[in-house]
């Protein structure tokens, strides 16, 4: 099974959240991945706070996990997901749409405590619950 971590899970890992760490241990042997939109979202927040220790932790996580690259078709898929969400009266963040597009292409489960993903045709697990 492949798991794509959302920014709130990365933040929880950086803070040492025991629930997330336990789930990560439980899923040893599975593919656990980051992607550019998540890395960007996490990094911009840490840069804003000048959180140099946490930035170093983010770099360690980046080296520890697999990496899903954005490809051109992800942008098209994200656009389609946006149209589907808006037609149902939902306004979702572009970052979430890109994460969902990558997850669909890679047949990955999005790991997030953000229930906005429930409006999208992706599988989601909340490792913080």
Image: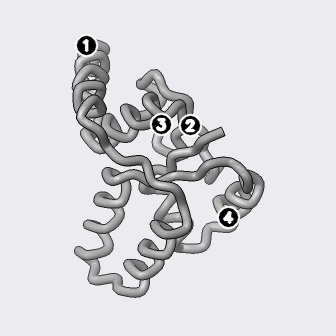
Closest to the camera, between mark 1 and mark 4, is: 4
Task: Say which residue label 3 marks.
Answer: 115
Q: How is the image coloured?
A: one colour
User: Which residue occupies 43% across, 72% down?
Assistant: 58
Rounded to the nearest angstrom, the CA distance separating label 1 from label 4 is 37 Å
What percent of the width, then of the height, locates residue 126? Answer: 60, 44
Say what secondary structure mark 3 lies in. helix
In terms of depth relative to the viewer, which is nearer, 124 or 61?
61
Closest to the camera, between mark 1 and mark 2, is: 2
Q: Quadrant of the N terminus?
A: top right
Residue 23's image quarter? bottom right
What percent of the width, then of the height, locates residue 5? Answer: 50, 51
- Residue 6 disc label: none
Task: Say which residue label 4 marks.
Answer: 21
Q: Are marks 1 and 2 in contact (CB under 8 Å)?
A: no
Closest to the camera, between mark 3 and mark 4, is: 4
Query: Tag 4: Cα neighbours inside 10 Å, few (<14), some, or many (≥20)?
Result: some
Task: Say which residue label 1 marks.
Answer: 87
Q: Is residue 98 above or below residue 11?
A: above
Task: Say which residue label 2 marks.
Answer: 109
What percent of the width, then of the height, locates residue 21? Answer: 67, 64
């Amino acid at each position: 099974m492949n798991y794509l971590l959302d920014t709130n899970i990365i933040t929880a890992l950086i803070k040492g959240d025991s629930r997330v760490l336990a789930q990560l241990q439980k899923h040893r042997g599975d593919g656990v991945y980051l992607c550019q939109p998540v890395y960007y979202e996490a990094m911009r927040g840490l840069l804003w706070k000048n959180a140099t220790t946490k930035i170093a932790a983010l770099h360690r996580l980046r080296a520890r996990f697999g990496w899903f690259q954005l490809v051109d078709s992800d942008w098209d898929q994200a656009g389609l997901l946006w149209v589907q969400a808006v037609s149902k009266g939902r306004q979702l963040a572009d970052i979430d749409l890109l994460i969902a597009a990558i997850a669909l292409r890679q047949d990955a489960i999005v790991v997030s405590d953000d229930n906005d993903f429930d409006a999208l045709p992706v599988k989601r697990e909340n490792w913080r619950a």
